[in-house]
Every structure is written in structure tokens, then in C-alpha cells.
Image (spheres, rainbow, N blue to C red):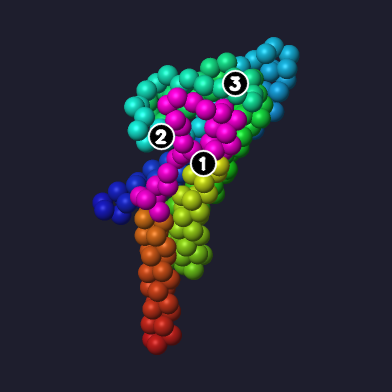
Amino acid sequence: MSTTKNMQLVRFLKGLMDFLYGAMIIAIVALILGLSLLPVLSSNFGFLSAASIEVRIGSGADPQLEVRMLELPKDNVAGIYIEDGEGTLFIETTSMYLIVIANAAKLVFALGLLYVFSLLRKIMQSIEAGDPFNAATGQRIRRLGYAVLAVSFIGPGAESMAAAEILKRLSTTTPELLAGPTYNAEIILASLLILLLSHVWSYGLDLERERALTV
């Protein structure tokens, strides 16, 4: 009974990883297609699109939804606001530069997540096949740890650089806006735990090989 329940859990997790992997591919394709079509829509119909970035409200400023520009921006901007005060700044604009900068950071983060989900899928496939305790799985767990660690730095780093570039082109705003987001300590800790697990996994495999040779 316990084995059956464990296999059901494995199949569920594998199905979840397959779904997330497929959803991430669709999101990346949609993002690329959107960036390809936006110049046509903008030039022919004056189509407005929203460039969104993560920001932090400057120290001493009261959180508020309305954002006012004290100077004319360098790009065509129809409106600018913070959604629900959560730090996501939306810019209604026809400027392809702002739109591409904002979405390029999201694309970098999405590609990193796609690689993470691909490693998780392969690990779940090994478990479902009944042969998880092998060197290949240990290597995948190690790569997963490094991938999560890289995503935890590269994703926020790319979004922060995009936010800094966009805010620079908006000139002065009130309240003062700073580039965000900040790095997530929980994700960094999770990546370190995954790397520790991969080390324990490899060490266990080495012990098993030594025992087999001794016998």
C-alpha cells in the first residue's frame, strides 16, 4: 500500500513538472511573439502596451498608487502607476525601447526557470522508472542547485538593471522610485540545501559502490 501511494505521488509530481514545463514554454513563446508583433501594432495603430517593472518606493516617501512625472520622459508615455501598492510599476507607452527592456528581463528569468523545470522533470522520470539512485541523478540534483542559485541572482539582477534603465528615462517622479526587486534569501537558501542534498546523494552512492566491491 505504501509503495502504491509513493508511486501515485511520484506520478502526480511528474505530471505537475510536465505541466509547469509546458506552461513555461508557452509563456516564453507568447512573450517572444508579443515582442515581435508590438512594433507593427504600435506603428500602424498607435497601440499602447504596458511595460512593467519591479520598483521600491524611496525612503521617506509615503506609499501611494499615483505616480507623477515632474519632467517630460525621454519616451512616449501615456500613463504611469503602481498596481495595488505592491511595487509593480506599469507604464502605458508606445515606446518599443521601454517595452523590450522590461520584457527582456522577464525573458531571462523565464529561460532560467525553464531549465530548472527541465531538470526536475528528468529527476522525476528517473524516480518513476524505479532507478533514481545513480550518478546521473546526482549530477542533475547538483545542476539543479546551481541553476536555482543562478536564477535567484540573475533573475532579480536582470530586472533591477531593466528597472534602473527605465527609471532613468522617466526622469524625476514623485514619490521617488528606486530600482528593484531585492534578492530572495529563501530561494538562495533552498539552492544551498539542494547542493547539500546532491553532495549527500553522491556520498551515499560512493559508499554503496565500496560496499559492493567489498562483498
Which portion, as a residue range, is magenta? Answer: 162-188
Tags 3 and 1 touching, CB below 8 Å: no
Tag 2 residue: 58
Give neighbour class at mark 3: few <14, some 14-19, many 20+ (Cα, 10 Å): few
Kindly identify which residue carries mark 3.
72
Q: Position of residue 32 (x, y in %)?
A: 64, 33
SS under mark 2:
loop
Q: Is residue 5 above or below residue 34?
A: below
Amino acid found under the numbered disc labelled 1? Ser
Q: Which residue sits at x=26%, y=51%? A: 1
Instruction: Judge left or right: residue 84 versus residue 119.
Output: left
The quadrant holding residue 87 is top left
> Of the residues under marks 3 and 2, which one precedes in the sequence?
2
Q: Tell which of 46 and 190 is nearer to you.
A: 46
Residue drawn 52% across and 21% down? 70
Determine which residue is flagged by label 1. 160
User: Is 13 located above or below residue 100 in the figure?
Assistant: below
